[in-house]
Amino acid sequence: MTERRPFCADLSRENGEPLGATASRIDHWFLIEYRGLWTHDALAGSGLSDQVKARLREQVRAVPNGRLLFVRRPDRRRAETLLAFTADSRAGNERLRRFDLGSHEDLRELDLLDEDGGARVEHPLFLICTHGKHDPCCARYGLPLYEGLRDEAEEDWVWQTTHIGGDRFAGNLVCLPEGVYYGRANRVHAAGILDEHLGGRVSLDHYRGRSIYPFAVQAADLPGKLDEDGRLVLVRRLVREGFLRVSLDE
């Protein structure tokens, strides 16, 4: 009888692996609603045409630190239209835009890089990784987190997503447009994380970092520098003569 392989998230938790400074490095996000099977390599294994796949890869490569994700919501399985979103997480440029699609073939002509394209989204998006074909931990721990957050937030704010990095920290959540990562969260934690985020604060117990910063800067952010209102003061990266320096945002 073959011994069952332990879940990487369980091993990480048991070994006390730190969560901090583990957020994937992403500035620009491309979210495509895809209701088909999510294979291990979601885009390559999808049913999208080769032309659409090439167009999406082209646009992601056109920006620094871009990431393409598939997203879905069970309540939209029979929706007549498809949605796509773009997000910019860079400090001072944070924004979300939504595009309505008749079919995925519309992506062949759609310029997702157009800053004036689509419709501006005035609310946050919460992405929970449930990509079980990439790592079973994501389904095991991501689905309960998704259900918990869905029950607390507005319906169209919460989406399941493909791989966002750090499977061993599942359940994983990214808050857009800021690119704030949380890990080891479950259904019980959902309401608290949501309240903190909407209040402009960071849930430190689950905080992995912010995607716009490299790991070294995320690590500098970890002591949890709080202002008088309890908000986490995020750091920004300054490069001078080849040295990495960190200063506090006002």
Image (cartoon, rainbow, N blue to C red):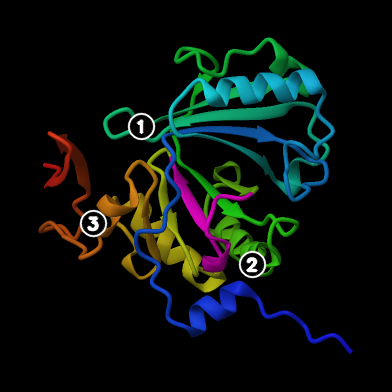
On screen, residue 58 above or below 78:
above
Spatial CA span between label 2 and label 3: 29 Å
On screen, residue 2 above or below 206:
below
The stretch drawn in magenta includes residue 171 = yes
Q: Position of residue 211 (x, y in %)?
A: 39, 45
Spatial CA span between label 1 and label 2: 28 Å
Q: Residue at x 54, y 25 (%)?
A: 61
Q: Which residue is mark 1?
A: 94
Left or right of residue 29, residue 146 in this image: right
Task: Name which residue type carries label 2.
Answer: Pro
Q: Which residues are magenta?
A: 163-176
Q: Which residue is mark 3?
A: 221
Q: In this rendered view, identify the residue nearer to me: 77 or 246.
A: 246
**On-image quarter of the C terminus:** top left
Q: Is residue 70 visible?
A: yes
Lower position in the chain sequence, tag 1 or tag 2: 1
* SS of the residue under disc 3: helix
Q: Which residue is mark 2?
A: 144
Q: Residue at x 64, y 13 (%)?
A: 110
Q: Position of residue 200 (x, y in %)?
A: 29, 50
Foreground disc of the pair 2, 3: 3
Task: Name which residue type carries label 1.
Answer: Glu
Q: Is residue 102 visible?
A: no
Q: Position of residue 79 (x, y in %)?
A: 78, 33
* SS of the residue under disc 1: loop
Spatial CA span between label 3 and label 1: 19 Å
Task: Name which residue type carries label 3.
Answer: Asp
* SS of the residue under disc 2: helix
Query: Are the two marked residues, 1 and 2, in contact with CB atoms closer than 8 angstroms?
Result: no
Q: Residue at x 18, y 52 (%)?
A: 233
